[in-house]
Amino acid sequence: MYPQCHAGIAVPNGLYAFLAAEPDGQYQLPRQLSCELQSGHGTDHAGFLQSIGPDEHAAWWLLWDDTAGMRSLIQLPYCCDDCTAADACLLPAGHEGRHGPQLATTLDVPPGVRLLLPARDLVR
Ligand SMILES: [Zn+2]
Ligand SMILES: [Zn+2]
């Protein structure tokens, strides 16, 4: 597994309102996004926003670059490289880095929060 990028962003209100007005959105719109690309990627961060219509031909993504203060809304099909139905990559087509199923989401535990491990790991 490869680590996933940890960058996060609050979805801008105007963008949220724009997508919330779309009657055929398939998912609940997020207020916060995390970048879904492989850690260390060189292009803009990318987070999934919404998919329109039952066939989900394309999805809306937010691209952002904190250094440049840039935010872009793009509509792209899902990635298909090497994808099978059971192991589908839900990243945007043409994305950088490894495919989604190869990425591990590792938790950044906030200070003061205890991370509880499954019991089997504690008794080993
Ligand atoms: Zn990123
Ligand atoms: Zn992919």
Image (tube, rainbow, N blue to C red):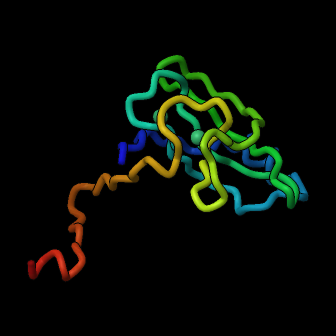
Q: Position of residue 59 (x, y in %)?
A: 75, 45
Query: At 57% across and 56% down in the image, what residue appears?
Result: 87
Residue 57 x/y as whole percent: 83, 47
Q: Horizontally, is 123 left or right of 65 in the view?
A: left
Q: Report the front residue among 112 and 24.
A: 24
Nearer to us in this view, 44 or 103: 103
Identify the residue shown where x is 73% and y is 47%: 16
Query: What residue is at 16 percent from the left and 75 percent from the top?
Result: 121
Residue 14 in sight here: no
Residue 54, image x and y in percent? 86, 61
Q: Quadrant of the C terminus?
A: bottom left
Residue closest to the eye, 90 or 14: 90
List the single residue furthest toward the right: 23
| Left or right, residue 69 beside residue 57 | left
Residue closest to the far left: 124
Q: Residue at x 76, y 40 (%)?
A: 77
Residue lying farthest to the top in this orientation:
68
Q: Quadrant of ligand 2?
A: top right
Say which quarter of the image contains residue 6: top left
Where is residue 117? Give x, y as percent.
22, 73
Mark yes or no: residue 9 visible: yes
Residue 57 versus residue 114 in the image, above or below: above
